Image: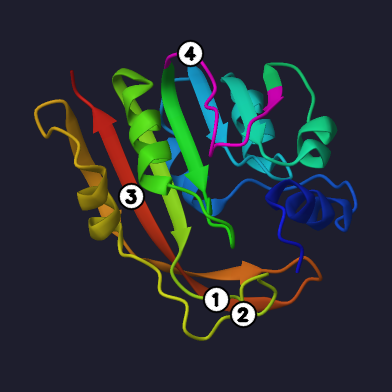
Amino acid sequence: MTTDANLFWDEVHAARPPSDPKPNARLVETVSDLPPGDALDLGCGNGGDARWLAGRGWNVTATDISAVAVNRLAGPRITAVRHDLRVSFPAGAFDLVTAHYLQTPFELDRSTVLRTAAHALRPGGRLLVVDHGSIAPWSWNQDPDARFPSPAEIAADLALDPVRWTVERADSPTRLATGPDGQTAEVVDHVLLIRRTA
């Protein structure tokens, strides 16, 4: 495996042909009833979430470390920008920040990134963090010793002031997922939803 994060993720996305990706299931179930506003998609990958949000009237800033991913993503209401979240974070204030499967084999201070995301929320805005809670057969991570922190652990690591932020959801549901070649498997998602109250 390459040791350069930019190159690694460029290679991952280059190996996947451009497609019409579907949004993540946890995004759809969480956001469908929210009024559209300004959204930030951290680690936008193939762009399924950004396109779905834009199609529902959200103005989306979509960011990824991979130039391949960012260059493929364009459309009405979408601004795609490349950021290495280890060193930079998109500017702006948002009504929704999503981070789906923002997990990497490279060093990344996720707590700092997600804390920054929480501070980028407008009052009433929400931070949705969805992580892998298990390893799918098609995942780049096949480490049998991999440990996936629980949503409660992630929330505790963020150390957000409960006067200003409220945890609305912290659970680990299962779902039937479909891989890039059509194979299916039951997987666990770790879901954390935080709302900025003030």
| Drawn side of residue 138 relative to residue 109, left or right | right
Q: Specify start and end residues of the magenta stretch as a single range.
A: 80-93
Q: Residues within 10 Å of mark 4 (few under 14, many from 20)?
A: few
Q: Nearer the viewer, residue 20 or 193?
A: 193
- Which disc, if any, is residue 192? 3
Dot 3: element: strand
Around disc 1, counting alpha carbons within 10 Å, would you say few (fewer than 14), some (14 to 19), or many (20 or more)? some
Which residue position holds label 4? 92
Question: Which colour style is shown?
Answer: rainbow
- What secondary structure do most residues of the magenta stretch adopt? loop
Residue 33 picture location, percent across and down: 41, 32
Q: Residue at x 27, y 54 (%)?
A: 170
Q: Which mark is residue 142?
A: 2
Residue 35 coordinates in the image, percent (x, y)? 43, 21
Name the secondary structure under disc 2. loop
Q: What residue is shown with label 1?
A: 135
Q: Amino acid at mark 1?
A: Ile
